[in-house]
Amino acid sequence: FGVRRVVLVGREGFKSFCKKSGQGAVPIDHAATVQDAVGQLRARHPGRLRVCGVEILPQAASLHDAPFAGPTAFMVGNERGGLTREQIQVCDSFIYIPQFGAGVGSLNVACACSVVLYQFSVWANAPGHGGLGVPPDPIPKMA
């Protein structure tokens, strides 16, 4: 999906089952605080980076509306409580993933990230949006 970096706040690693399949695919940085993480990311994109929280909030825009603009860092919370107040305060905007049917309003973090990153990659690669800066992977040959 064009992810260039993951920043973990307050943790020095993933659980072992999370790390095996993606290990080495994307650089992982660590930050002691949310402020440090955002500072690291903004330093990589001076004046351009937007921090977009993925959370069900009244001010959140629907992912269906593709409310994106330029280089974006997506902030996700933990699976139990979502974004913390500190995380909410550093976000420039918010999106939520509309769901239909079962009455369940949330997805686990891995699923939510996948959906959001896919939709962002579709938006970024649409004409006039500049792309992700990396070519798509070739279609794998299936046996």
Image (tube, rainbow, N blue to C red):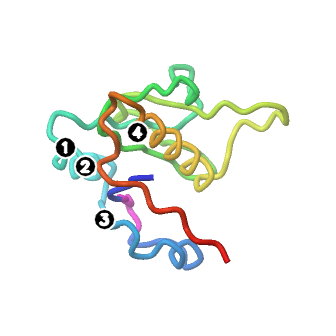
Which three-letter amino acid code belongs to the residue tagged 4?
Asn
In the rendered image, the vertical position of residue 77 relative to residue 32, given as above or below: above
Instruction: Give the structural element (helix, strand or loop) at label 4.
Output: loop
Which three-letter amino acid code belongs to the residue tagged 1?
His
- Marks 2 and 4 sit apart, C-alpha to C-alpha, by 22 Å
- Mark number for residue 41? 2
In the rendered image, the vertical position of residue 30 relative to residue 116, given as above or below: below
- Marks 4 and 1 sit apart, C-alpha to C-alpha, by 19 Å
Magenta stretch contains residue 7: yes
Instruction: Give the structural element (helix, strand or loop) at label 1.
Output: loop
Write the residue at 45% across / 25% down: 67
Quadrant housing the C terminus: bottom right
- Mark number for residue 29? 3
Give the farthest residue toward the top.
Answer: 59
**Mark 2 or 4 closer to N-term?**
2
Horizontal and vertical percent for residue 42? 21, 44
